[in-house]
Image (spheres, helix red, strand yellow):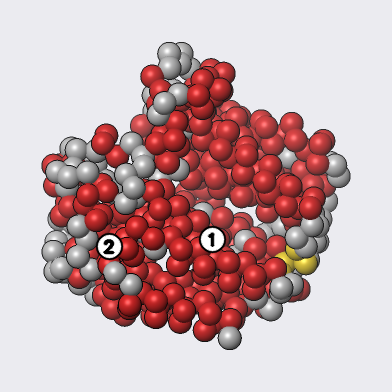
Amino acid sequence: MMNYLFVAVPVVFCFFADELWLKYNSFYFYFFQYLVFLFYIVNNKITVSVLFSPTFITANYFFIYFIAGSYVTPRDIGLNSLFSFSEGMARTFLNVKNYREILILFLISNWCLFLVIQKNIRIYTIWPPSVKKEGSFIIPLLSVVLISLFSLLKIEIFNLWIYPSMFAITIYIMPRLLNRFSNFIARLPCYCILLLSFFLVSYESKRELLYVLLLILFFELFNRRYEIKFTFKNVLFVLMCLSIFLFFIMAMSIARGYGNFDVENVLVAFFYIGDYIKSDIFRDAIVDNLEFSGVYFDTVNCADYVLNNQIPTLLGSTFIKPLFLPIPRELFPLKPESMINIYTSTFVPGFYSRGGSLPVGFYGEAIANFCFFAPFAVYFLFSGIEFLYKKLIVSFETLASLKYYIALFLSITIVQFARGSGLELWILYPLLGLPSYLLVSYLSNRK
């Protein structure tokens, strides 16, 4: 009955509704699915391992962004005029020819993620493991601060290494903080140091700050152990994390030039948040900051290009691209292109030639590769990811193992893949961070 409500009701309605009406009102369908999803979650005992599983995070990401994106995009809310497209984003969206089919594919893809969650929700009840008292958090915390200060030197060769290393060290720090301080208030100064350090490094990337907040949220809920209860205290803590995220997002936006404030350095941006909220551009700017319209528009537009044969069906090539990373294109001209390059060069070649890129959400990439069979790809790929996650988390006994590091890194950063940064970058980040994780582990445990 739950699955029937989730997929059959909105899909059947799509067949009979006017297509223009669907373009303006599809957020109702996503919202309905999200309500059914939340009802299922609230009425089932879930652990922190379910709450932070890759599929659960991805499902919540798509629900929230598709609800917001499908509302703001046709209404032209956001600073979309900044982009040099031949037409505005809203007009281009309203001219999409295959929206009914795309919407149905998205709704069925949501259902596929829901099925994966239902299949695995009972498996993780034996986790999390106990936290053993091993290693200091002082050396790793100082390492994060030093790396963030080092990043201010803007040495290009280290750019790709800095964030994965800081995040890997933070994964090492968190269980040690739980050991050292039993009270949340006592841990709060360390959290502030971490957030400010990441802010210095990642003020141009909202998702990278989100990963740190998710990591903090994971360990704070981890402290409650086993079953997650939707108590007032837990809900209040989650809302507090969201408020902090928005607070930092606004500061990051000001630091990047939104509102034309005279910001001498990125930390000064916090003092202009009040003026930013009062400014005339705030509503459009916050939508643009959170990428609500961009995520939904590019995912829909890419799918429409595929269904119109403007982009050929890729037959899985972008998903096997990581296998060819070590091979230079000069040696193997048939090396697969990334979804970002294919879509951007087709949609806005001028923007692409200047180095611009437009990420396509995972659903759009699945349609580009498998057309109307995309929901099957969603189901089988996330079943595989969940299988790997399950194997990792049920087999380690402490929060000091490599299995713990890999499981948590891949799970927390799954949004990177879902958003459209590519499977290869999602896999590459934990590999880049691994040497730093091993180094601080060795230094912290050395007698």
The image quadrant where one finds the C terminus is: top right
Dot 1 crowding, Cα within 10 Å, few <14, some 14–19, many 20+: some
Instruction: Give the structural element (helix, strand or loop) at label 2.
Output: helix
39 w.r.t. 85: above or below: below
Residue at 34%, 69% in the rendered image: 103
* Residue type marked 1: Asn
120 w.r.t. 166: above or below: below
Q: Is residue 212 left or right of residue 225?
A: left
Instruction: Give the structural element (helix, strand or loop) at label 1.
Output: helix
Which numbered tag is attached to residue 442?
Answer: none
Q: Tell me if I can see residue 367 in this picture.
A: no
Nearer to us of marks 2 and 1 is 2
Q: Tell me if I can see residue 90 in this picture.
A: yes
* Residue type marked 2: Leu
Q: Residue furthest right?
A: 182
Q: Which residue is mark 2?
A: 20
Front one among 247 and 436: 247
Residue at 51%, 27% in the rendered image: 277
Residue at 60%, 78% in the rendered image: 118
The quadrant holding residue 342 is: bottom left
Disc 2 and disc 1: Cα gap in Å? 26 Å
Q: Which residue is mark 1?
A: 60
Where is residue 207 shown, x and y percent of the image? 48, 45
